[in-house]
Image: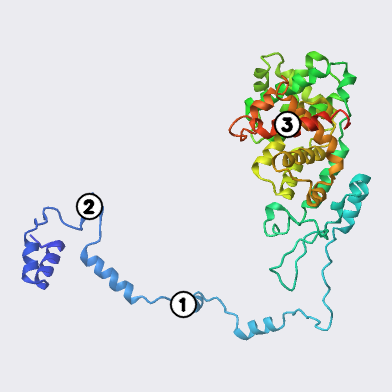
Amino acid sequence: MATTLANRLENQIQENLPAKHGAIIKKRTAIPTTRPALETIDNKKVLTSKAVGDAKQKMQLQKPTTTRNALKASNIPMKPRTTLQKSVQNKPTLKVNHNKAISQPKALPTSQPIKQEIQKLLPSSVKDSPMLIGSPCKIDTDDLSSNIFDLNLKSNVENIDENDCENPQLCSEFVNDIYHYMLYLESESPIRRNYFKDTGFKPRVRCILVDWLVQVHHRFQLLQETLYLTIAILDRFLQVHPVPKVKLQLAGVTAMLLASKYEEMYAPEVSDFVYITDKAFTQAQILSMEILMLKTINFSLGRPLPLHFLRRNSKAGQVDATQHTLAKYLMELSLVDNDMCHVPPSQLAAGALCLSIKLLKDSEWTPTLEHYSTYTKEDLIPVVCHLAKNLKSAEKSSYQQAVKSKFSSHKMMKIARIDAVKGTMVEELAEQAASHKL
């Protein structure tokens, strides 16, 4: 039988390798030669070793032809190189007049005309505010490291935004303009003094409704802003469009639905409010009331909240967490008070912080707080006295137990149980509330 290609390769390897390697290869099982190797495999023709060698030799004899040789072989006339050069030389070129001055781009419009237009819309009380002397953040071109927030402040007023220029989230360049605009917005959507008396209901009806909304807010675990916006929407709606007593609860849950859609990332569904009212109202009634409330308040949901101003004032006063939490407790107690529903959010926040630092730190209202809150100590005396009255009545009033229970928890630092809220200073200020009208 003719020797196969595999056997020949093995014999060549054995001849070239040392003896010890050849012995190892001999131990291997011999390749069966019953089937002609590389001839046919499953009825498929394959190149034999001789055919493979002839194909390699043929490939080596053939030389690859270049593009120029290929063009000659195909008898395609080639364009002379001189003609190509002439066509490039005759191509028109772009002439630039270096003597002509380059036109400068148009400068962007400055914000000064815009600020002037905004100041025209501001009420007189806001125009005279000391915060209007503020100017945007200016960078010293001589020394870029000294990025000073120039406010043209008085000598006794600290610049609380001086170290915030490098943090874009704090918006130090526009923070004063933002709060000017918030003061303008709160003046555009005021709430009338004692508007609830014109509805024919007893004052305690609103107290019961607000106390229940506080419990619903706590049950749904919503944001703090949602509660304040709920009460603001409810008061603005009821002072324009009074509703029957049987639909007051419907107006309350609808106001919370609107506030949740505005403030929450995951707002409760309409069916959740149907369940919380023990199915006293249907989904269709809530959606119908939602349309009515939005039309009544003209879809204006951007009224600033006391929390927004409190955070700014707390930064200006450099207060700690305990003082800030006590101020929030005072503000939530004021939501149940019918006599304080007309107080502007900025004044309520300033009065709450003023009373908080007075009770805990026995500090006075500093010029820095006066500058950034736009309220003097004399402006805040009526608000402070009424807040002290609410703080005193929270010990016995049944309408404020939801707020007190909320701020008695560990999460709120048990601020409603500290000794400062039961001291003699609270009683003295509460007695003066009757003589100071808001």
- Disc 1 crowd rating (10 Å Cα; few below 14, some 14-19, many 20+) is few
Q: Which residue is drawn at 82% across and 35% down?
A: 383
Mark 1: amino acid: Thr
Task: Work out whether residue 13 or residue 157 is closer to the camera in this orientation and state it.
Answer: 157
The residue singled out by tag 3 in the image is 332
Mark 3 / mark 1, whichever is N-terminal: 1
Q: Is mark 2 on a helix, strand or loop?
A: strand
Residue 121's spot in the image, x, y percent?
Answer: 92, 46
Q: Quadrant of the N terminus?
A: bottom left
Q: What element carries label 3?
A: helix
Residue 269's spot in the image, x, y percent?
Answer: 66, 26
Residue 257 visible in the shown view: yes
Q: Which residue is drawn at 86% across and 53% down?
A: 132
Query: Decide: marks 3, 1 in contact (CB < 8 A)?
Result: no
The residue singled out by tag 1 in the image is 66
In which image quadrant can residue 24 be found?
Answer: bottom left
The residue singled out by tag 2 in the image is 41
Residue ranking furthest to the front: 424
Q: What element carries label 1?
A: loop
Mark 2: amino acid: Ile
Mark 3: amino acid: Glu
Q: In which quarter of the image is the C terminus?
A: top right
